Image: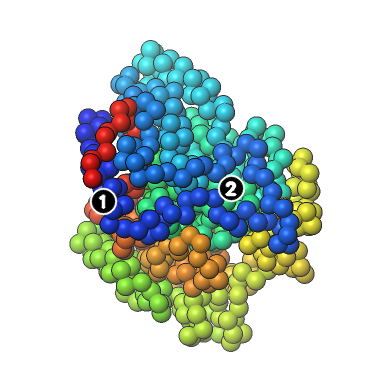
Amino acid sequence: MSHAPKKRQSQSHAVVAALILLLLRLTSAQQLGLSDLGEPADEAVVGATADREPALISPDSLGPGPAVTAQQLWQGLCQTGKPQNPVVELTIAEAHFMMLAGQLTCTDLVTAYQQRIAAFDQPLQLNSIRSLNPAALERAAQLDSQLQLLRATNSTSMMPPLLCVPLLLKDNIDVAGLSTLAGSLGLTDNFPLANAHLVDQLQQQGALVLAKTAMGEFAFFPSFCISSASGVVRNPYSLSHTPAGSSGGSAAATAASFGMAGIGTDTGNSVRGPASHAALVGLRPSLGLVGTAGVVPLRVDRDTVGPLARTVEDAVRVLDGMAGPDPSDPLAPLMVNVSLPLNYTQFLQGPAGLAGTRIAVLRQISGLPGADNGIQRLFEDALGALQQAGASLADDFRIVGNSLGRDWDANRGGLGPAIGHWNVGGRWVELWTCNAPLREGLDAYLAAGNTSYRSLQAIYQAGAYHLLAQDGIVAALKAPYSSAQYPTAAMRDLGMRLIESMDAAQVDAVVYPTWNAQPLRVGGDPANEAEDGNNSPMIAPHTGSPAITVPMGNAGLGLPAGLQFLGRPFDEAAVIRLAHGYEQVTRHRLPPPLFPECRGAAASAPAG
């Protein structure tokens, strides 16, 4: 694949600056989210009582930054020196092409991303990066030496597939020497001695950990991203809106080109939801495909780890680096008798991958009451694009017949969205009710470490958490039964009926919008989260199915929307093939205009 640096360099910063200035003139600061860029008055309130002193931000966190002015936006925030090579929207293949041609070093690439983080993240209060890896440049120098040896010996065909891919890791994934806070001040002194299993795998493939990203407290809050450790994360497409959660930092940072790709965790939504709100590709793998040893758990029965990237190809390249058995993973038994492909990049077939496929349309989800009209229009356009590329549709697909012969209903007979419900015994059962997995999983993680607080109970008693997390923590502490009772019969039944229904309809995958609503506003009422249009938790977490979201266009106000493909367990091949084909025929992703390339010289603001 060729790289076109001249084309990237020719993008006019003046156009970007003029656009920003025009928005500032025509739109109120409140609408742009610039008026509330100062420190929120009550975001840092933690613990169980309102009179408790706000806790300090973690010592190795970047912390809050100053607000910016219109003049600074015009001049360009990133003027500390022009990078040797542009990095906005840079892909893995493009970077490797330049490295092999001697046009780019790993040190150059890491330095450019560090420069962008320093220039944009805190000055604009995107607040996506929790801490930088102080060893990143040392690692880059080592990889440069490896690259030089490969070139000198004409052994470039042996180059590791992820050589010098700077990754943005969600802060619940252990990296030796870096603190892992999982969004909570209760883990401020948690410095793991070993890498998570998936980090070892990625580094063996040549990847580099650039930074740890901000996240929702303990991976709570699917619709917004807030924590006692880092505060609020904002959406790079509109700083007055949320990027969703809980992998909001990984999504916002990746969308703003602060790294090559992000890594998040997905229990119910947390890779796919933020990816959709940030015009990214987000892939939730089948349960068990990516090991979770060394990851702070939320629900060990549904946790998985997945990539967030600006292209399907990059997401799949990163998945290739993580996939494989992890003997320490509680879900490792799910991998027994599963044959994995040699790699997943072989399923990147472009538009040709859509020809002759059959896709089930889950209109029960897309047509839920209150669905945003703009997103519904984008969904219909997406279906049309799939058909034009050679796919056929099984319209109004249904998951039919549980043991009582009752079909799954996305609206629960008018009771509201079925966020994991399934009809059992003639009634709707909430599949997320048991919070014991959080207590049991976190207690086991803390007991094996060297932190001051060795249990969730201890963190609760110390008040070392964000106030909005209190209800979830209390529910976990009060949960009377063990996670050993999971998966429940209802979950197993739902998974079996999904596969049976897909087989009967002869479909490769199921499709629906990732969200039925646009991103929430920062500072909105968290109570609105119950009706936020989040479709990701409905099926994949309970069935173990892989699901991938890909940009579907902008629904309005420049805010992105995503299209989600869901497949049978361990059939990543199908969803990758469909997502890549759709991406290539539509190419909806656009970078956020507030985060342009860095430049060397300042422009003068126009008079008037």
Callout 1 environment at 10 Å: few (<14), some (14 to 19), or many (20+)? few
**Is 196 above or below relative to 495?**
above
Res. 359 in view: yes
**90 left or right, relative to 484:** left
Q: Quadrant of residue 261?
A: top left
In the displayed structure, 447 sits above or below 404; it is above
For the residue pair 304 and 43, the one nearer the viewer reads as: 43
Residue 541 vs residue 20, the one in the foreground: 20
Q: Residue at x 55, y 77 (%)?
A: 422
* Amino acid type of the residue that numbered disc 2 sits on in the rendered structure: Ser
Residue 99, image x and y in percent? 35, 24
User: Tag on residue 284?
Assistant: none
Residue located at (42% from left, 62% from top): 519
* Residue at the top extreme of this rendering: 152
For the C terminus, the image quarter is top left
Q: Which residue is mark 1?
A: 22
Residue type at tag 1 = Leu
**Considering only order in the chain, which callout, 1 or 2, is on the residue closer to the N terminus?**
1
User: In this rendering, would 62 be left or right of 28?
Assistant: right
3D distance between C-alphas at marks 2 and 1: 31 Å
Front residue of 574 and 596? 596
Q: Residues within 10 Å of mark 2 (few under 14, many from 20)?
A: many
Q: What SS does tag 2 mark?
A: loop
Residues under numbered marks 2 and 1 in contact, where contact means CB atoms less than 8 Å apart: no
Q: Which mark is residue 230?
A: 2
Q: Residue at x 27, y 57 (%)?
A: 26
